[in-house]
Amino acid sequence: MSVPQVAIVGRPNVGKSSIFNWLAGRRLSIVDDVAGVTRDRVTYLMQSGDRFFELVDTGGVGINDVDNLTQEIDDQIEMALESADVILFVVDTRAGLLPLDEEVARRLRYIDKPIICVANKTDDPSMDNQAHEFYRLGRGKLVLASAMQNRNRNELLELILERLPPPEPEGVEEAAEPVMKVAIVGRRNVGKSTFVNTLAQAERMIVSEVPGTTRDSVDVRFEMDGKVFVAIDTPGLRRTKSVRTDIDFYSTHRAQRSVRRADVVLMLFDCSEPISKVDKQLVQYIAENYRPCIFVVNKWDLVQGKIPTEKWVSYLHDTFRTMWHVPIAFITGQTGKNVKALINHTQMLFKQSRQRVGTGELNRLVRRAMENFPPPLFHGQQPKVFYATQVSSQPPTLILICNNPAAFSPNYRRYLLRVFRDQLSFSEVPIKLYLHKRRHDDERDDSGE
């Protein structure tokens, strides 16, 4: 189970970024009276008691962006709503109930997730009656809050914690393995549909198939060696400036959504074609969403004996320098050569992404890593990690509680990630690594107890 997410949404200028910073306890999102300052999603890993969750700030719903990025902002909001476990619907008590608040409420009406309505800028009890008009939005109990006056923060946090999904039980890696969803992505004409068809023909065990065209994402359910999985065939992507029709636009969004809901992504390349800008954009999107991935070089029969596999391996590593952990497979989708081995490897990545490591083992590993290669002094201060813990899986998410997160340079964080890959069972999957400053009330030592 991945870290739960709490998305903050609302019309422009209701104080979403102020609520985000207030809950996080630090200034992370830009707060400004000008509408539209927040465009991309901003995330922060929150800890409240023993629970962790990601807080997600979004742009204003319904804004007309001065830089013509309205659609991009709306896309980010939609992705936040899609991945959220709890939604904070923020309104402004001072401004009162506006038509755009009602539009946001209509947008949320068909989302089957816990929603908390936060009446921000309710600075003191004399404004409570004014805030009660927001009950008309039909979102249940209001939280009368003020980020500026620090009003009812604990009440809001308690409601969030009550509505989060239950924590992952101990020993989850031994639980029944769920159905693995595999997204097959790539630019046009790399052989994605042929690859899926080969799977279907070879196994002849399609349980169900969702109808669609090459412009849709198609889910095909298979069974191989007694294990069930779902292959998601996605439309081929074009360069962004070539996306001119509604069909191309929605095809791109379906492909991206397929990546987000996949457990493992197979990124297909045509061995007879050079790596394109579209390929690079796709790989970046996969990386940004922390999805386990295999680089699949397809149509290998066309060049076998002419180009050594090592040349393509070096080509991929040189092109995607931050993706050295990604395994590489060479297949011929049309004939099925190496396809079964590829699917077996895909299942291995799925298992890796669901692994958990004990706190004691993780802390011993961090201690050894820092003893073998101590971080350099930072403004005369020795960087120190008090303890480490894994807070979730899919992707494996690790937190290091330290004296100063800024003291650990990007290079040193990459060193720690390499150590985790080498020594733990996450060698081929993305790892989320957070460094948090130890709270004053946290008395745990480096044993994590």
Image (spheres, helix red, strand yellow):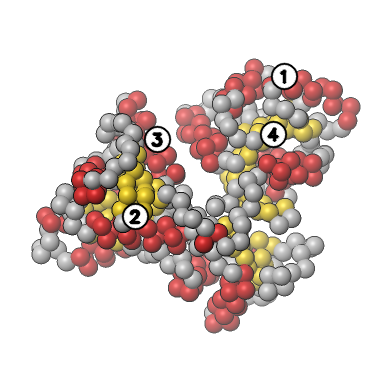
The quarter holding residue 323 reads bottom left
Residue ranking furthest to the bottom: 372
Q: Earlier in the sequence, mark 2 or mark 4?
A: 4
CA–CA distance in space, label 4 to label 3 = 28 Å
**Residue carrying label 2:** 226
Q: Which residue is pictured at 37% across the width and 49% down the height?
A: 229
State which quarter of the image contains the C terminus.
bottom right
Mark 2 belongs to which amino acid? Answer: Gly
Would residue 345 be found to the left or right of residue 387 on screen? left
CA–CA distance in space, label 2 to label 4 = 43 Å
Q: Earlier in the sequence, mark 4 or mark 3?
A: 4
The answer to whether the residue labelled 1 contacts the one labelled 2, judged by CB atoms less than 8 Å apart, is: no
**Residue carrying label 3:** 253
Which numbered tag is attached to residue 116?
Answer: 4
CA–CA distance in space, label 3 to label 2 = 33 Å
> SS class of the residue under badge 4?
strand
CA–CA distance in space, label 4 to label 1 = 14 Å
**Residue carrying label 1:** 136
Q: Nearer the viewer, mark 3 or mark 1?
A: 1
Q: Nearer the viewer, mark 3 or mark 2?
A: 2
